[in-house]
Image (cartoon, rainbow, N blue to C red):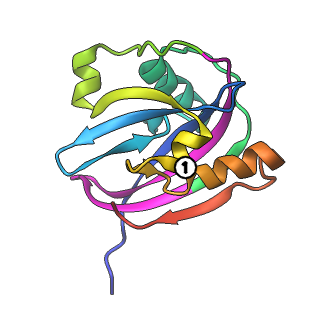
Amino acid sequence: MFPRLRFRQAVRGLMIDPADRVLLIRLEYPDWTGWVLPGGGIEAGEDHVAALHRELAEETGVPQVFMGPPVWHRRVVAPGISPDFDGQEELVFLVPCHAFEVAPGLPPDQLLAEGYAGHRWWTMADLESTTEIIRPANLAELLTHILEHGAPATPFRLEEPPG
């Protein structure tokens, strides 16, 4: 019998500006560095929407945004993510927005403690040509589908290997 995996519940925002750029956050940990959508863990008593509003305020400085529908559910096994979890389950919401200057709401030392090492607006060409790690790995493909067809009626289900 295999042990039951423990997944942290999380939420992320696919923030797309009018130029079809997407905002990504750079995370740096001792064993992993890469770019992800803004967001994070759901705290006790929060629902997905409240958690995403809090996370976006902390990481981008935007306290309230229009939140569209969920566009994908991503599950990743990541042993060592924390002593309490074996991976993370994320629900990703479409967040159409205006271009804005990112000004995180948390102090720099707290951001650094959480692995936050920067942010950047990425074009489709940037996503398709980079050699840097981006998660989900097929973000350019997912973004293309959403830009061409809109949000899916049912969120895509993504499973990614560790790393």
Which residue reaches farthest bottom?
1
Residue on which the image places disc 1: 128
Look at the image and say whether residue 42 sits in the magenta stretch.
no
Give the answer, above or below, for where 102 lies relative to 143.
above
Q: Foreground: 82 or 13? A: 13
Q: How crowded is the residue under tag 1: few (<14 C-alpha within 10 Å), some, or many (20+)? A: few
Residue 78 magenta-drawn? yes
Amino acid type indicated by mark 1 = Glu
Image location of residue 7, percent across then percent down: 40, 57
**Which is more toward the observer, 134 or 40?**
134
Q: Which quadrant, please, contains the C terminus? A: bottom left
Image x and y of residue 9, in percent: 46, 48
Q: Who's the residue at 35% across and 26% down the image?
A: 118
Drawn side of residue 125 relative to residue 8, left or right? right
Looking at the image, which residue is at 71% across and 23% down?
Answer: 66
- Please name the residue shown 49% across and 18% down the image: 57
Per the rendered image, the range of residues in magenta is 74-99
Q: Secondary structure at mark 1?
A: helix
Percent coordinates x, y for residue 114 in the rendering: 27, 32
Magenta stretch prevailing secondary structure = strand
Classify 39 as above or below 100.
below
